[in-house]
Image (cartoon, grey):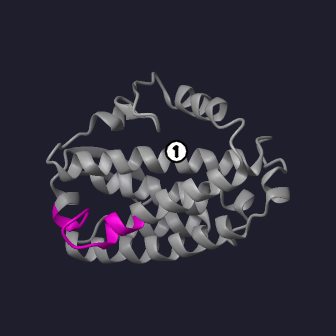
Amino acid sequence: MNHQEFTRTLSEAVQLPANERYGCFAGVHTAIWKEYQQAVQSILPARAAEASSDGRSIAQVVGHIAEWDRFFIQMCAEFMMGIQRPRSWSLKGYLGTDGSVMDFDNIESFNQYQMKRQADLPWGEIQQTALRAGEVLYCLFSTSGLMDGAHLEDSKPAHWYLPGFKGEVPLAWMVWAVIMEHEGVEHAVDLGIAG
């Protein structure tokens, strides 16, 4: 799904009643998850070592997505616990794989930390983490009683601007959109996802 199609679809969906919006978002997520999963599974070590469009290796791009997905899983846990605006949305309380808790000042500092941490990780480990985290997120949003419409609606309103839509929506909907955009649109060229 290309960026223009993704944006148009979400701009239309966000204006629907919550249950219809959920169905539309779920359909987009299913398509994106299948493409992302297949793309990551098909990357061989030689391809993982190649440079991406921004100079990072393909492995670093996938590792970047994987760590954001891990952070988004934390956000979802906070939403499901009834927290209307998770600390993790403000880059606070990130849980490292060793159990350490970290706060970040901005997105770039999070990205730089992950790039350094993953510098010597083998491709197989990065690939496995990416697939596992992506699947957990997909299951969270596609399983009744988890990140379903009720939990999405129960988050704090946040301002969202999309071409064709400007207004407030519950924050959890924005988080879901960011997850999908990151996995299926933003890095699609480097992952070899048709768009």
- Residue 14: give x, y in percent of width and height: 32, 64
- Residue 191: give x, y in percent of width and height: 70, 61
* Residue at image location 65% in from the left, 64% down from the top: 40
Q: Is residue 96 above or below residue 80?
A: above
- Residue 160: give x, y in percent of width and height: 35, 48
Q: Which residue is mark 1?
A: 67
* Residue at image location 80% in from the left, 41% down from the top: 55
Number of numbered discs visible in the structure rendering: 1
Q: Is residue 11 above or below residue 34?
A: above
Q: Which residues are magenta?
A: 138-150
Q: Residues within 10 Å of mark 1 (few under 14, many from 20)?
A: many
> Which quarter of the rendering shows the C terminus?
bottom right
For residue 1, say whether it is visible.
Answer: no
Q: Is residue 163 above or below residue 145?
A: above
> Which quarter of the rendering shows the N terminus?
bottom right
Q: Using residue 35 as the reference point, say whether residue 173 is left or right of it.
A: left
Which one is in front, 61 or 14? Answer: 61
Q: Secondary structure at mark 1?
A: helix
Q: Using residue 10 as the reference point, say whether residue 115 is left or right of it.
A: right
* Residue at image location 65% in from the left, 34% down from the top: 115
Residue 108: image quadrant is top right
